[in-house]
Amino acid sequence: MTSELLKKPGLVLAVAGVAVLIGPLASLKRTIPHFLLRTVHAVTLPGGPAILTVFETTSAADPVTGRQYRLTVERFTFVRDSRVLVLSLSSPVGADNVDPWRIISQSLRFKS
């Protein structure tokens, strides 16, 4: 299903009271090196409902060694009133970041 979302740039995904235009997903595919979409779904966090987009990309080359690494990115998109907040967390593929990422994503709040 996630690859089908990229083919429908005008589609609006609305879940848990949050609407996200799929066009930005197609934009990610064009602008992020070696973009590979894993999943898109709604989540409810203390900061409010959000869309979680999980994808993989390739890191920038290390300035000394020139090596690049595969990264997993979890991008949370929060919408409140007319404000949009995007939280992106990334690490090497396979790294165990469940606890730190949960702490960060669950501590996020909108200021009034």
Image (cartoon, grey):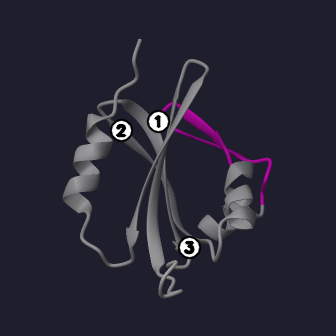
Where is residue 18? Give x, y as percent: 54, 34
Whichever of labels 3 and 2 marks the residue nearer the N terminus, that label is 2
Name the residue tied to disc 2: 44
Residue reaching furthest left? 99
Residue reaching furthest top? 112
Q: CA distance from mark 3 to mark 2?
A: 32 Å
The image's mark for residue 87 is: none
Q: Quadrant of the C terminus?
A: top left
Q: Tell me which amino acid carries mark 3.
A: Ala
Q: Is residue 39 magenta?
A: no
How many marks the image carries: the answer is: 3
The image's mark for residue 16 is: 1
Q: Residue at x 74, y 50 (%)?
A: 23
The answer to whether the residues at label 1 and label 2 have Cβ atoms under 8 Å apart is yes
At numbered mark 3, what does the secondary structure look like: helix, strand or loop? loop
| Residue 62 appears left or right of 1 | left
| Residue 10 appears left or right of 105 | right
Which mark is in front, 3 or 1? 3
Q: Quadrant of the N terminus?
A: bottom right
Dot 1 surroundings within 10 Å: few (below 14), some, or many (20 or more)?
A: few
Whichever of labels 1 and 2 marks the residue nearer the N terminus, that label is 1
